[in-house]
Amino acid sequence: MFAKRHVISMREFSRDEIDSVLDLAESLEPSARGGRCEALRGKILALLFFEPSTRTRLSFETAMMRLGGKTLNLGPAEGSAMAKGESLADTIRVIGAYADALVIRHPKEGSARLASQFSPVPVLNAGDGAGHHPTQTLLDLYTIRKESSLDDLKIALVGDLKYGRTVHSLAYALALYGAEITLVSPPTLEMPDRIKADLAGNGTIVRETHALDDVLDEVDVLYITRIQKERFPDPYEYQKVARSYRIGTENLEGARDRLIIMHPLPRVDEIKPEVDETRHAVYFRQSFYGVPVRMALLKMLVGDGLE
Amino acid sequence: MGLNDDEMKLRVTPIGNGTVIDHIPAGQALNVLKILGIDRTTEATISVLMNVASRRSGRKDVVKVEDRELKEEEVNKISLIAPGATINIIRDRKVVEKRTVDIPDLIVGVLRCPNPSCISNTSEPIKSHLLVKSKNPVVLRCVYCEQTIVENIADYLI
């Protein structure tokens, strides 16, 4: 079922493979909460973060430790050999010989694919520039499965759908489950046409609107993303759309009882703190689910797989 | 235009042995040479004809490489910019083989990825790899960053 050596892009996952990751994650959840697990005792995971990250790095570290393994951290890139002009390919070959698997985040798109070509051990992509971030997509799917359902799903993707490529991977993955997707964004941040065409070509129902209130009472999942300031060449353009969508309790009055609100975090002001206390808020649990999902991937790639 | 046979021969001498690449779109001959890796270090005699009258397409370019029979995988790369090109292999002044070009499934080290943030555009020890997603129209996708190329392909020649 899971014959992968590396995890680079969601495009490479079939629905069966995703399901097998999510199933294993479910069975590992008690260990993710602190239960004893020694599946990867004696194994070493190297974390190579050439760009800042807190939750992804700590979540991978936690996942490895919860499995009984240990981690190595490459310090800030400027302190390492890269600053002396060493290629990424050489760095990967060297560190790949120390560890049993590598996690990489790097500003250049395609860097994780390159790493997989030079690494003697499995590579997990933790974000390559504006490229892929497959473990985020997998934990999003896990959250939906746990807190709502992946069957007959109606989901709204809200915010920056143009630059936010993790939303693109999520949309592709949701299409595998036949989800009905509503895209909610300011006119300047709509999902690129080629992706909408891909989704429609797969028979996925895709709707588009600029008004969040249009969809609030119709969906099971509201997936909110931050509008990322750093993606805008022009600060004025950013200011125009920055506060397009703000969810407060007043927006949720007509919402379905079972509506869940997700957010990859960090949030700025897309979701008011008052929402945190409602039954709809799942974003902090979503963040925790990154641990069992990453444990599942590590066990599959480094351990003896599915047993 | 309007050349008689003698005038034509002055310009276009038939070659004895080698390869004639015909029906190159007008203006693309130099790019064809570039793709084939033919430059000033090449010892073979090369004839380049540009903007020749053509019954099929109005104007065309032709490239002749003497004493060298180009291999199929070499000439297939030119299909990116000259999909209608024909390849004639000449031996003793006779065309012994005539074939069209076919776009390969993977293009390695010929075009650079258009994405400036792609790892293949850095000093890493790798060649560019572009997957051919569609042949007509040509759609290429970078193996590294997944950026697609659909037009102005010649602009990305390395």
Image (cartoon, coloured by chain):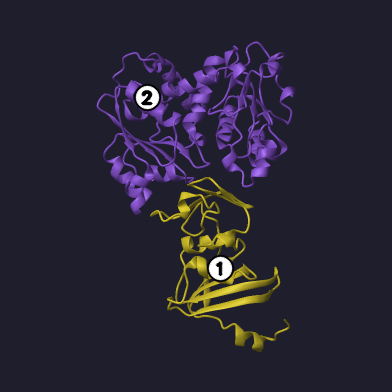
Chain colours: A purple, B yellow
> Is residue A169 something that shows in the picture?
yes
Q: Is residue A275 above or below residue A161?
A: above
- Residue assigned mark 2: A62
Q: Decide which of A97, A34 is in the foreground and name it.
A: A34
The answer to which quarter of the image holds residue A213 is top right
Quadrant for residue A179, please give it. Answer: top right
Whether residue B126 sits left or right of residue B13 in the image: it is left
Q: Is residue A58 left or right of residue A221?
A: left
Look at mark 1 in the image and give the residue it sits on.
B31
Mark 2 in CB contact with mark 1 (< 8 angstroms) = no
Whether discs 2 and 1 lie on one chain: the answer is no
Provide residue B135's location: percent of width, then percent of height: 59, 52
- Nearer to me, A209 or A226: A226
Instruction: Look at 62% across and 76% down and name the residue there.
Output: B50
User: On the image, which quarter does residue A258 sit in?
Assistant: top right
Type of the residue with mark 2: Thr
Q: Residues within 10 Å of mark 2 (few under 14, many from 20)?
A: many
